[in-house]
Amino acid sequence: MEPGSQPHPITDAPATNDADAGADLADPANNSASPIFEGSSPDALESSGLGWAFVGRGGMRAGWSILIFAAVFYFFRILIGTVLYLFGLVGEKREISAAIILLGEAAALLALIGTAALVGLLEGRRIPDYNLADRRLTQHLFSGLVCGFAALSLLVGALVMGGWLRFGPAALSGSQALRFALLWGCAFLAVGAVEEGLFRCYGFFTLTRGIDFWWALVAETALCTYLFLNGGGNGAFGVYAAAAVGLIPCLVVHFRSRARSSFWQAAWVTSTAFALYHTGNNGENWVGIFAAAFIGFVFCVSVRVTGSAWWAIGCHAGWDWAETYFYGTADSGMVAQGHYLSATPAGNALWSGGSDGPEGSLLVLAVILTLLVALLVVYSRRGRGLSSAPATPTAS
């Protein structure tokens, strides 16, 4: 997926997940109380006036943690963006080049790291605690890169076989092709780190420790209402569809195993928020936005079965690199400068993806489903799977 909405570093606010302002159903043994409230007993905190609305037995409630994180991240984005603007490194014109995107995403990544470190101090956690601690980091990152490239290649191959995508001659060769390959590789690693850092690291980790179905429903309603009141964005129906598709499964999981359902509720909310995050991209259609939610869910599952978000970061980067640079197709409506091959959609946009690119084709849903099945098969053979204990935060 293209960098979500590409917010201007000074004027535009990044889309954030304003979910769950008060739920905290996690087992207190699996959470560390915030140092802000250290020394006070849970019973005293919950019985002191309105303290129960802000603090649970596991420390600060998940919703407030999300809101604080969003506010701090936005502040750092403004601060870093202003510095870049004053030094003439960014301007009002938004070019779609590897260098510009790399600079913008590097600034966002710096803001994200600073925010995670600061909020982590408030919560008594370290940055790796947010779904990043992994003894097999390199293996999972590389595996994700390969899977992302392979999945996008499968989609492109299906489009070519169906006559919905046509290739022209290579646009780059020699040292120029290598230079752009490296530039786009770095840019999309940064994109993957930022978007997964927001949605599958801090956001997913935090909601998993403190959300149930009813708070998830409140969050979904808030996301859809926000989108509707702000004009819907591009492909808004995909967000509404993602919210609707997750409703019944999450309700069933809630009644079958309420104490263990927070993973699924958090996956529902963060995946819908991830789709909303992309509605600001030019050229998006509802299929592409729904696909963003679907692959967001796959990334949540990958956190569960691999134990970290590194596979998701790699898969995200590999998918974008293949789509934008290697095959030269549109990526969420973006046709980048400096791509290796050149491709043009043909025929019905519902199958070709049209201006959205391969992600806007109905075939993308089958490819993402294939990716999900492959993920489960591979990691189930290694002794991890959806039947294992849910991924729950641990005290730092």
Image: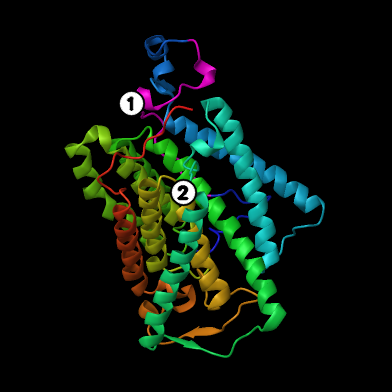
Q: Mark 1 packing: few (<14 Cα in 10 Å), some, or many (20+)?
A: some
Q: Is residue 279 visible?
A: no
Q: Is residue 275 left or right of residue 74?
A: left
State if disc 2 and disc 1 touch (CB < 8 Å). no
Query: At label 2, which amino acid type do we have?
Result: Ala
- Determine the residue positioned at 46% across, 49% down: 309
Label 1 – label 2 distance at C-alpha: 22 Å
Q: Nearer the viewer, residue 9 or 180?
A: 180
Q: Is residue 123 visible?
A: yes
Q: Is residue 96 left or right of residue 271?
A: right
Q: Nearer the viewer, residue 297 or 5?
A: 297
Q: Is residue 281 left or right of residue 287?
A: right
The answer to whether residue 353 is above or below residue 262 is below
- Disc ID at residue 309: 2
The answer to whether residue 166 is above or below residue 61 is below
- Disc ID at residue 296: none
Q: Is residue 25 magenta?
A: yes
Question: Mark 1 or mark 2: which comes first in sequence?
Answer: 1
The location of residue 120, given as percent across then percent down, is 55, 31
Q: Is residue 244 magenta?
A: no
Query: At label 1, which amino acid type do we have?
Result: Asp
Where does label 1 land, which residue? 27
- Determine the residue positioned at 58% across, 90% down: 169
Q: Which residues are magenta?
A: 15-39
The location of residue 55, given as percent across then percent down, is 43, 21
